[in-house]
Amino acid sequence: MYFLQKFSEFLWGLPLIVTILFAGIFFTIGSKFFQFKYLGHILKKTFGNLFGKNKDDTEEGEGVVSPLEAVSIAIGGAVGTGNIGGVATAIAVGGPGATFWMWVAALFGMLIKMVEVSLAVYYRSKDEKGENYGGPTYYMQKGLGVEKNFRLWWLMAFIFGIGIFSSVIFTMQNYTVSEAVSSTFNINMLVVSAIYLILSYVITVRGIPWLGKVSSILVPFMCLFYILGGLFIILKNVADLPNALSLIFKGAFNGTAAIGGFSGAAVSMAIRNGIARSVFSNEAGWGTSPMIHASSKIDHPIKQGLWGAFEVFVDTIIVCSITALVIIITGQWSSGLDGATLTLSAFEIGTGALGRVIVTISVFLFGLSTTGGWYAYFEVLIRHLFGDRTRAKEMAFKVFRAVYPIPGFLIVVIAVLKEMPGAEVWLLGDIASGVPTFINVIAILLLSGKFFELLKDYKARYIDEKAMKSDFKVFYEDKIKSS
């Protein structure tokens, strides 16, 4: 376990943190602070469309799923165990100050996610059935390989793919769900894990279109369910909110002294854990959710990019903040607990046994949605790998569906037999996210020019409403056809 800790510290050391923050600042300045200046526009064109009768921004253009279904799968993949177990572990290790750095990473992450989603939609390809699929490996091939003549694009794509597929092995969903259900209902973790294994097969067997329909129903419900429970605790203890915020801001810049069962944390620990858990939770820069956003029925890449920014806003600014404030405001952050157990304890302190049950149900739903969302990402990678070789691709799907849920079950078995604490198990999640994030962020920085072109076109069409050049193509395939 010492090796895993050192490897995780290396992956999430200064180089990767600086790269993520640099990318966030670079795109923020280059877009003229779009996620701040146009936050109202982002929310209007995403959250607002969920309740409006306007169809101009939904289900327009070619694709496999609607924008809502795409973002539901993506939020389902992002809003998961990281919001409950991951945030708790960040605070348990880095102190309340980790919450501040989680917010910083998310505010920049809104634009990073918007960039990668927009590029994924722009560079997407049609398969043999005429259905659109895309993602980081696609924009590495077309944007870096074809347009920029970068011959080693395939090496970046290969390393990215290996990093993403390592998440099949280093998956946290089964563990966090089993931990939560076991501690709440006093059921053996291995039994819970086995049940989760079976349900994982059920939700992944029918592919992306079916996942989209299920996620569009399940994800909004599960988010609302969890948020209302957390807000009840925060409002109930609103007198303690100023002190909780003080702990967050002081801890972010001064570190946190040892108190209770908490061993103390330096500023560097707060920064590292806050940013690492933010990326693991909202997946901004990770390159995952662009793989499902690229299949959306949309007529402009930036329109779907707005959903990417909204996804980070919901995941971290809302859901992760709820978790963090509940843990801090109830005083459980210094209890010595970590992972999902810490969050469960905080909700139980805040609302009694009912609160613990609410979180347990949320963890269960979040875990299943994440498992389904990540299956969609892997399916896109397999499609790109096998291209038009239909028979080989279908065989790969069958094999992958058969083995996909098994590693998560094995992690629970190992954790139970070895009696591993939650913080150690979460090291696996950090390793799985570090490698692909670094590669993907480098790729989108190299392709920043294309994003700024698309953003300029979008603002002219839909915000400033100025005339654009009629020959500007908002999709790569259209550009190729016209050349």
Image (cartoon, rainbow, N blue to C red):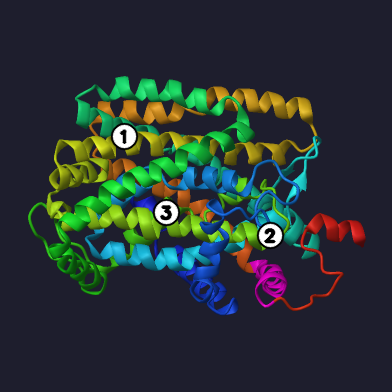
Residue pointed to by mark 1: 361
Q: Residue at x 54, y 73 (%)?
A: 38
Mark 1 secondary-structure assignment: helix
Residue pointed to by mark 2: 301
Is residue 283 in view from this perspective? Answer: yes
Q: Residue furthest right?
A: 483
Specify the principal SS of the magenta part: helix
Q: Residue at x 33, y 29 (%)?
A: 412
**Mark with earlier residue (3, 1):** 3
**Mark with earlier residue (2, 3):** 2
Near mark 1 (Cα within 10 A), the count class, few <14, some 14-19 or many ≥20, is some
Q: Is residue 118 left or right of residue 199?
A: right
Q: Which residues are magenta?
A: 446-464
Q: Nearer the viewer, residue 440 or 376?
A: 376
The amino acid pointed to by label 3 is: Asp
Determine the CA span between mark 3 and mark 1: 18 Å
The amino acid pointed to by label 2 is: Pro
Q: Nearer the viewer, residue 279 or 151?
A: 279
Magenta stretch contains residue 449: yes
Mark 2 secondary-structure assignment: helix
Q: Is residue 259 left or right of residue 307?
A: left
Quadrant of residue 360 within the rendered picture: top left
Residue pointed to by mark 3: 315
Determine the CA span between mark 1 and mark 2: 35 Å
Look at the image and tell me in which quarter the C terminus lies: bottom right
Where 65 sits versus 143, above or below?
above
Near mark 2 (Cα within 10 A), the count class, few <14, some 14-19 or many ≥20, is many
Q: Residue at x 81, y 64 (%)?
A: 473
